[in-house]
């Protein structure tokens, strides 16, 4: 029996089996596509292949966060059972979910004054957020207390790097994130935007790279520059992708050949339906522990 409940949002973009194996609980965002609402339940209600196929055909999904009532419904059964909870929230820089979780925490503290419910803003997303949760699961399994684990992730969350590139700008144009002119020019020149997560948990454009092979080399170069211990990096590395698994495999192979002390193989996940509603297909994201993202 675990000493406390470790939980997160579905937008950590790990598989259902992975969450179950690591005993990590998750609460689902929702998305609407073609007029129907679905839970962001890790591809159970709508397989990722179907979801990205709909986007490729022109669908424009919308998303909804986990609200306060849904958080109360999620947390309360654990508290009723006398269990304490450490919840790592999806980035406040991308969603109001963290604020909703804090309101739930305030209400539940009145109902269960003897229980502990700690909410931490991850300032992360997708499988980078997932790598943080995975690290907390390792700490929990090694006997680290809830309060010590919460303090550690609060101190180190900005050491988790998120680097993304996209090889398909179609969804960005449809959603108004880039202009039609930028789309045409970028497509002709083979421009692949390389982005990362800043210290406020926002997705930020960094470079415009010409060509898929070059952007793959550049994203691994950023890991060389920022990874903890450089080429001697010996922690885990996660990758997520939106309907471009072969590209993700290529990046994973580059990472594994560049960092021989890596802790296990690179874990490749799918970008889930909520994050994928905003990126569309063609995105590869690389996540690792490194130097601080905090601005000086």
Image (spheres, rainbow, N blue to C red):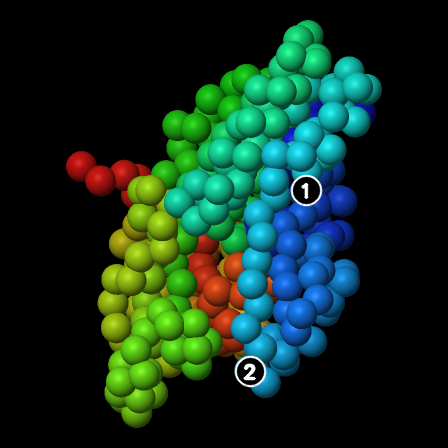
What secondary structure is marked by label 2? Answer: loop
51 vs 240, nearest the viewer:
51
In the rendered image, residue 179, in percent from the top left (x then y), is placed at 30, 78
The residue carrying pointer 2 sits among few (fewer than 14), some (14 to 19) or many (20 or more) residues within 10 Å by Cα, namely: few
Asked where in the image residue 133 lies, by quadrant, the reply is top right
The residue carrying pointer 1 sits among few (fewer than 14), some (14 to 19) or many (20 or more) residues within 10 Å by Cα, namely: many
Query: Which residue in the structure is indicated by mark 2?
Result: 58
Query: Which residue in the structure is indicated by mark 1?
Result: 26
User: Residue at the location (31% across, 42% down)?
Assistant: 199
**In this picture, is 164 found above or below 87?**
below
User: Residue at the location (63% across, 50% down)?
Assistant: 29
Q: Is residue 296 left or right of residue 188?
A: left
Q: Quadrant of the C terminus?
A: top left
User: Residue at the location (55% across, 17% down)?
Assistant: 147
What secondary structure is marked by label 1? Answer: strand
**In this picture, is 44 found above or below 52?**
above
Asked where in the image residue 66 lies, by quadrant, the reply is top right
């Amino acid at each position: 029996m675990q000493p406390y409940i470790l939980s997160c949002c579905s937008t950590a973009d790990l598989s259902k089996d992975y969450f179950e194996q690591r005993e990590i609980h998750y609460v689902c965002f929702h998305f609407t596509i073609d007029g129907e609402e679905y839970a962001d339940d890790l591809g159970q209600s709508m397989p990722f292949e179907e979801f990205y196929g709909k986007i490729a055909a022109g669908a424009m999904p919308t998303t909804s966060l986990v609200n306060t009532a849904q958080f109360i419904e999620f947390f309360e059964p654990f508290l009723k059972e006398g269990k304490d909870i450490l919840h790592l929230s999806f980035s406040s820089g991308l969603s109001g979910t963290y604020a909703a979780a804090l309101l739930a925490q305030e209400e539940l503290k009145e109902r269960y004054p003897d229980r502990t419910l700690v909410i931490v803003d991850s300032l992360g997303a997708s499988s980078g957020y997932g790598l943080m949760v995975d690290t907390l699961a390792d700490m929990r399994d090694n006997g680290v207390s809830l309060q010590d684990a919460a303090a550690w992730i609060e101190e180190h969350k900005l050491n988790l790097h998120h680097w993304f590139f996209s090889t398909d700008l179609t969804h960005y144009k449809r959603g108004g994130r880039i202009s039609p002119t930028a789309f045409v020019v970028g497509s002709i020149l083979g421009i692949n935007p390389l982005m990362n997560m800043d210290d406020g948990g926002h997705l930020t454009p960094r470079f415009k790279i010409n060509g898929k092979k070059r952007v793959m080399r550049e994203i691994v170069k950023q890991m060389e520059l920022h990874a903890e211990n450089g080429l001697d990096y010996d922690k885990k590395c996660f990758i997520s992708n939106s309907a471009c698994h072969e590209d993700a495999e290529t990046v994973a192979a580059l990472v594994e050949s560049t960092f021989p002390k890596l802790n296990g193989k690179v874990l490749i996940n799918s970008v889930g339906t909520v994050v994928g509603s905003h990126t569309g297909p063609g995105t590869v994201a690389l996540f690792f522990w490194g130097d601080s993202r905090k601005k000086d």
